[in-house]
């Protein structure tokens, strides 16, 4: 696939905007039919989900369910919705082989809720593909560069 860093950046900025605007179904639609969204354990970015407890390990069906659930009042921790700001930087195309573009990008996500501001920092690793003529996320791995989930204690938003 022939894609430029600028095209990748625009795609990632669009993803961040959808998340900040709580357009969760549109965010889920960015994923390929076989897409995955994972957050491995802190300090173990290459952990195997079969032997380690991931913060999130979603296939396409599960990430769609997660996105829809976050929009409902029953998702108490996110109702009313947090205010978020997703920043993306240092976008790098790592490889472009066999129709899969591997991308790394640093991120900082701020979450404001009930007079608290939580900060999540790390690296997102993407595998992007063309599907039905559109750029899609085959996989998104969120590697948190934190020592622990403190003070926030959880990941209740989409990173």
Image: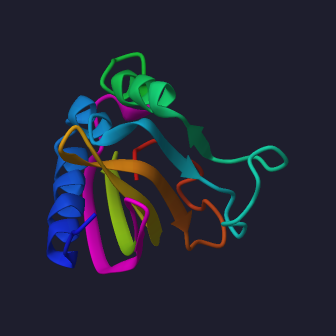
Up/down of 70 relative to 136, above or below? above
Q: Taking the image as drawn, is residue 27 in sight?
A: yes
Q: Taking the image as drawn, is residue 116 in sight?
A: no
Q: On the picture, is 80 further left or further right than 17?
A: right
Image colouring: rainbow
Q: Find residue 31 and report its image quarter.
A: top left
36 vs 100, nearest the viewer: 100
Name the outermost residue toward the front. Answer: 98
Residue drawn at 23 percent across, 52 percent down: 15
156 vs 5, nearest the viewer: 5
Identify the main secondary structure in magenta: strand
8 vs 38, nearest the viewer: 8
Residue drawn at 41 percent across, 16 percent down: 74
- Where is residue 94 shown, x and y percent of the image? 42, 79
Up/down of 58 relative to 122, above or below? above
Q: On the picture, is 44 further left or further right than 26?
A: right
- Where is residue 86 shown, x and y percent of the image? 27, 61
Up/down of 44 relative to 154, above or below? below
- Where is residue 29 shown, x and y percent of the image? 27, 34
Total label count? 0
Residue drawn at 34 percent across, 53 percent down: 129
Q: Is residue 47 magenta?
A: no
Residue drawn at 70 percent across, 70 percent down: 43
Name the outermost residue toward the right. Answer: 51
Quadrant including the N terminus: bottom left
- Where is residue 151 shown, x and y percent of the image? 56, 60
Q: On the picture, is 146 further left or further right than 103?
A: right
Range of the magenta residues?
A: 77-102
Q: On the picture, is 106 further left or further right than 149?
A: left
């Amino acid at each position: 696939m022939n894609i430029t860093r600028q095209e990748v950046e625009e795609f990632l900025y669009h993803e961040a905007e959808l998340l900040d605007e709580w357009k969760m179904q549109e965010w889920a639609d960015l994923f390929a039919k076989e897409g995955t969204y994972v957050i491995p354990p802190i300090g173990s970015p290459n952990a195997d989900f079969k032997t380690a407890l991931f913060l999130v390990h979603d296939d396409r069906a599960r990430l769609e369910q997660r996105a829809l659930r976050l929009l409902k009042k029953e998702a108490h921790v996110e109702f009313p919705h947090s205010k978020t700001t997703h920043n993306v930087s240092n976008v790098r195309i790592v490889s472009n082989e066999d129709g899969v573009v591997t991308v790394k990008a640093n991120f900082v996500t701020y979450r404001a809720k009930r007079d608290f501001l939580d900060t999540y920092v790390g690296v997102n690793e993407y595998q992007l593909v063309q599907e039905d003529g559109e750029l899609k996320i085959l996989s998104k791995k969120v590697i948190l560069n934190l020592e622990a989930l403190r003070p926030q204690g959880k990941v209740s938003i989409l990173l």
